[in-house]
Amino acid sequence: MSFHQRDEIRWNKKGYYERFDGKKYWRKLCVVEGCMKRAKVLNWCKRHYTEQKQKTLLTSTSTPVSQQSSVSSLSTSTPSDSILSSNLLFHSTHYHHLQAVSQIPMPPPSYLYTSTPTLPIQSQPVYHVRNEIRLNKRGFREQYDGIGHWRPLCIYDQCMKRAKKLSYCKRHYTKLMNENQLSASVTKNEPTPSE
């Protein structure tokens, strides 16, 4: 029995790449070369599918009248109907083309078998100890919870509790709010110098 690591990529005999999700499934990747996102629609990731859809919508608006005559019964003067008709035009003319193109087996792209690796190779996984503390990119402290997540800590000096609201733990957040309410009530009760 072979064990696979999370984010391991393989070429499927059906003609697409798959990435192991770390649990038990191989997830299909986008058919665009170099895209490492999961395939959602017609073997494309959402980004490339919407880009292709926008390109075809732009080309379909400049198509001759003979091709648009099949949709002419659907198009009216309201904008929502024109969007509907353009979506129908996209799906009717390009659905089968996209499906056929995405099913063609492709050879592995060059970045998977080059001598200089372009994808990061993790020879030794990095292990963190539970309750380990680090500074994140913004300079705030984070604590490792032992199950794969870095949790933010309270920004109050020397406090080791998890941050809940406005980067404070519950205790320091309520203390801060009480101080703010107290100072607000004191400023309301003070007489103004004009009196």
Image (cartoon, helix red, strand yellow):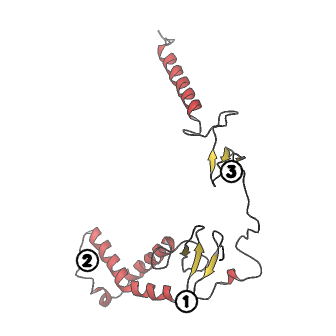
- Write the residue at 66% across / 70% down: 5
Q: Report helix, strand or loop for mark 3.
A: loop
Task: Give the mark nearer the N terminus: 1 vs 3.
Answer: 1
Q: Report helix, strand or loop for mark 1.
A: loop
- Write the residue at 55% across / 40% down: 164
Identify the image quadrant of the N terminus: bottom right
The amino acid at mark 3 is Lys
The amino acid at mark 1 is Pro
Q: Is residue 179 above or below residue 68?
A: above
**Residue 132 x, y percent position in the rendering:** 72, 47
Callouts 1 and 3 close, C-beta under 8 Å? no
Callouts 2 and 3 close, C-beta under 8 Å? no
- Report how far apart the C-alphas of labels 1 and 3 lie in the structure: 42 Å
- Write the residue at 50% across / 23% down: 181
Q: Report helix, strand or loop for mark 2.
A: loop
Res 109 quadrant in image: bottom right
In the drawing, what numbered circle is on residue 75?
A: 2
* Neighbours of disc 2 within 10 Å: few (<14), some (14-19), many (20+): some
- Report how far apart the C-alphas of labels 2 and 3 lie in the structure: 52 Å
Query: Left or right: 18 with respect to 46?
Result: right
Residue bearing the label numbered 1: 105
Q: Is residue 35 visible?
A: no
Query: Which residue is more in the foreground, 24 or 12?
Result: 24
